[in-house]
Image (cartoon, rainbow, N blue to C red):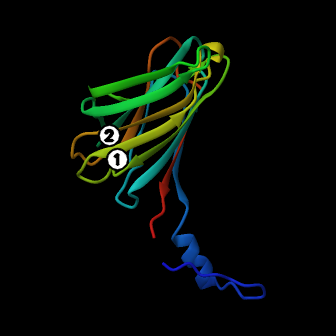
Amino acid sequence: MAIKTFTTGEVLTASDTNTYLANSGLVYITEGTATSGSTFSVNNCFTSTYASYLVQFSVIPTAGAYGIDVRLRASGTDTSTGYYWGVTAIDVGTGAINLTRGSNSTLFTTYAIAGTSGRATCVMNITNPQLAQYTSLTCQSTDSRGASSYVGINAGGQLANNTQYDGITFLLGGGSGTISNFQVKIYGYRQA
């Protein structure tokens, strides 16, 4: 679609408005909050309507410190093999660069790590979960453990199979407590 330029005094028609609204931006799909347990699943959030999705989540643990990991789901069942990913992060205390990876792992790690002193957050892009091809995942996250935390956290990878996914599970990645302060919102990238 060619971008239309409006000038001062020109009338913005309903047709122009509807065209622009239909061809850009994010579309809210769903959200959820975990009140207990060590996992939280969202089913039927990925459809053929969108090729890419934005997933935002945040967490404060009830005790200890832990990270949040991810698995994709098909028809209510998690996939627990075939995740290939890498993470880069800078140690706040030493300035050292931490490199972590997973090869044919059981999950995708976001490195969103929370301590009771702060909220860990993550913004994740998931591309092609509904196509019969590899699904890509990228994210930027925070580690809120204060002096022992990491910054500049970037993770990326793929789920190496041809399964069509319709859901996602968030998993407690170690430590103690529950994910009772976990919040997630999922959006689709509108297609022209």
Residue 115 position by quadrant? top right
Q: Residue 36: x, y in percent?
A: 52, 23
Q: Nearer the viewer, residue 65 or 87?
A: 87
Give the quadrant of the C terminus: bottom left
Decide: few, some or many residues near mark 2? Use Cα within 10 Å; few <14, some 14-19, many ≥20. Answer: some
Question: Which x, y percent locates residue 21?
Answer: 57, 71
Between 81 and 111, the one nearer to me in the picture: 111
The secondary structure type at the circle numbered 1 is loop
Vertical side of 16 occupied by 190: above or below = above
Residue sitting at x 53%, y 18%: 96
Residue position marked by numbered label 2 in the rendering:
158
Q: Is residue 177 above or below residue 108?
A: above
Q: Residue 137, position in %: x, y?
A: 39, 41
Q: Amino acid at mark 1?
A: Asp
Report whether residue 97 is seen: yes
- Residue 20, image x, y percentages: 57, 74
Amino acid carrying mark 2 in the image: Gln
Q: Is residue 183 visible?
A: no
Residue bearing the label numbered 1: 166
Q: Is residue 121 left or right of residue 172?
A: right
Q: Residue 170 falls in which quadrant of the image?
A: top left
Q: CA distance from mark 2 to mark 1?
A: 16 Å
**Residue 138 placement, left or right of 11:** left
